[in-house]
Image: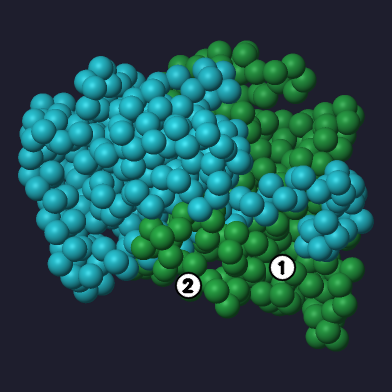
Chain colours: A green, B cyan
Amino acid sequence: MAMLPREGAALAERVLQGDRRAVARAITLVESRDPEGRALMAALYPRTGRAAVVGVTGPPGSGKSTLVDRLIEHHRKAGRTVGVIAVDPSSPFTGGALLGDRVRMEKRATDPDVFIRSMATRGHLGGLSRAAADAARILDASSKDVVLVETVGVGQAEVDVVRLAETVLVVAVPGMGDEIQNIKAGLMEIGDVFVVNKADREGADRTVAELQAWLEHSAAGWSPPVVRTVAATGQGVEELAGEIGKHREWLLAHGGMEAKRRQQAEAELLDAAGEAAVRAARASPRYQKAVEAVARREADPYTALGEL
Amino acid sequence: MAMLPREGAALAERVLQGDRRAVARAITLVESRDPEGRALMAALYPRTGRAAVVGVTGPPGSGKSTLVDRLIEHHRKAGRTVGVIAVDPSSPFTGGALLGDRVRMEKRATDPDVFIRSMATRGHLGGLSRAAADAARILDASSKDVVLVETVGVGQAEVDVVRLAETVLVVAVPGMGDEIQNIKAGLMEIGDVFVVNKADREGADRTVAELQAWLEHSAAGWSPPVVRTVAATGQGVEELAGEIGKHREWLLAHGGMEAKRRQQAEAELLDAAGEAAVRAARASPRYQKAVEAVARREADPYTALGEL
């Protein structure tokens, strides 16, 4: 473990005790991707792995935030503490304003046993998945029983973010047309539990049937269930929470948790390697010259990199 | 420039002559991310920078492929050669089957002056943006006058891909509801030309007005136009092509092209650095041990990386 300055060690200790302000400050540190953040993670990482980490993803407008709000409510009733990382695509014009439903979810944060943090995708240059992963680990280390990681969108960055979860919820809505195509394409392979939200709408039966038909082709092992919910009223949320719990039990009973932890460790290690290389390249005194050479087509990126 | 084996040098020469089979083979090479692909790019990169590279992005169902099809038609009528890189989210179940409209576009590939290649996002572990960038450069080196890079989705990977274009088209459709929120959030800052496709549908005026209202806040310099199209009939496509041309002229006249090339060079260099680091980490004899240590929480990813 890297040596921590006195202040950093004190911060790590306060995070482990669940101090809200320390948790907030720790997440800000890892968002900045500064060396202090890495030292902090070195101190906290061995104390992670206790929380049930659940990823929630799906296309815009599928009601993910309302569903997360309902899951927070469910866990709080059962006396569990909850942390939420909500990854927002942010606009240069609004400076990362909250998206519709998310406002409601944020209100839960007045509960001292709920910690919610929005992270903007803007300006992260690929470092977002590392920052979000670190933030989820911080909530885990701060003794939250459940950590929910919500992402808007269906791109690769979102897939990376939810990969740090043990259980991944993919949220669909009835009558998505082209979008269900996209879910099928990008998200079917990462979903452990599928949700058809807004299930009181027309077309819900068909969406459920389509998802089930696709899931028949999936690999042996865990069979992802398809759960109907109406997040706005809370309908189906208990059943959904039950299925999430079953998936975790299944992972623990069948050695799947170990395999998952290994995959996550590999992804985190490789992410860290990529990030370190980008940092090193930028810090090189010949960096600007190399960029110019590539821009003028005097060198290709690979050759220029070799010369850094 | 790295030394090329005789075969690789011959392949590069045939790509430069525009040989279709050589271009196809070269793209397969860079998709594999093998050292041969990097050597090939070292040979080809200095011969790039001539094509007009246009990125086309927007949410699923906005009709991007039909629009790309129309743009190919437009350029062919003007006697220009066209290359297309279509980045597909691919499913583990279908093995990367084509998405709806794209089938039509693929038919253009029977024209010897049109080269179309689909690239799947699956299995790329973050290397997709590098592979797609290299593929676009190969088409450029093969003397295509116009290179179109189409991506499905609105995630970070898509943003990375279109960043290699000089001109970025963001495609919206009327009545997108929540989705326009998402366009605003993730794509407003990267669009040079905005398209409201399916503009014969109800709500087109409102979508155009909303986009224009947002664009008023954008930075000084180029003012992104909002063009109405009906790709299915070809309506508005000439005007769209005209606006794309105007953007390129503006870049050339105001020094913007140089700045853009520099940004692209920087992104390509940093991507290459990240990729090289991931490759090096995996090749380390202590890699498996490091992964195990992180998985068992005996080390954090940063400390484990330091020990590789």
Of the pair B57 and A246, the residue shown nearer to us: B57
Q: Residue at x 13, y 44 (%)?
A: B241
Q: Residues within 10 Å of mark 1 (few under 14, many from 20)?
A: few
Q: State which quarter of the image contains the C terminus of chain B.
A: bottom right
Q: Earlier in the sequence, mark 1 or mark 2?
A: 1
Q: Could one spot residue B283 in this view of the protein?
A: yes
Q: CA distance from mark 1 to mark 2?
A: 51 Å
Residue picked out by circle 1: A112
Q: Residue at x 56, y 13 (%)?
A: A213
Classify residue B295 as left or right of residue B121.
right
Dot 2 lies on which element? helix
Q: Chain of mark 2?
A: A
Classify residue B135 as left or right of residue A105.
left
Q: Where is residue B259 shown, x and y percent of the image?
A: 32, 68
Q: Amino acid at mark 2?
A: Lys
Of the pair B43 and A224, the residue shown nearer to us: B43
Residue picked out by circle 2: A289
Front: mark 1 or 2: 2
Q: Where is residue B57 shown, x and y percent of the image?
A: 33, 43
Of the pair B9 and B275, the residue shown nearer to us: B9
Q: Amino acid at mark 1?
A: Pro
Disc 1 + disc 2, Cβ < 8 Å: no
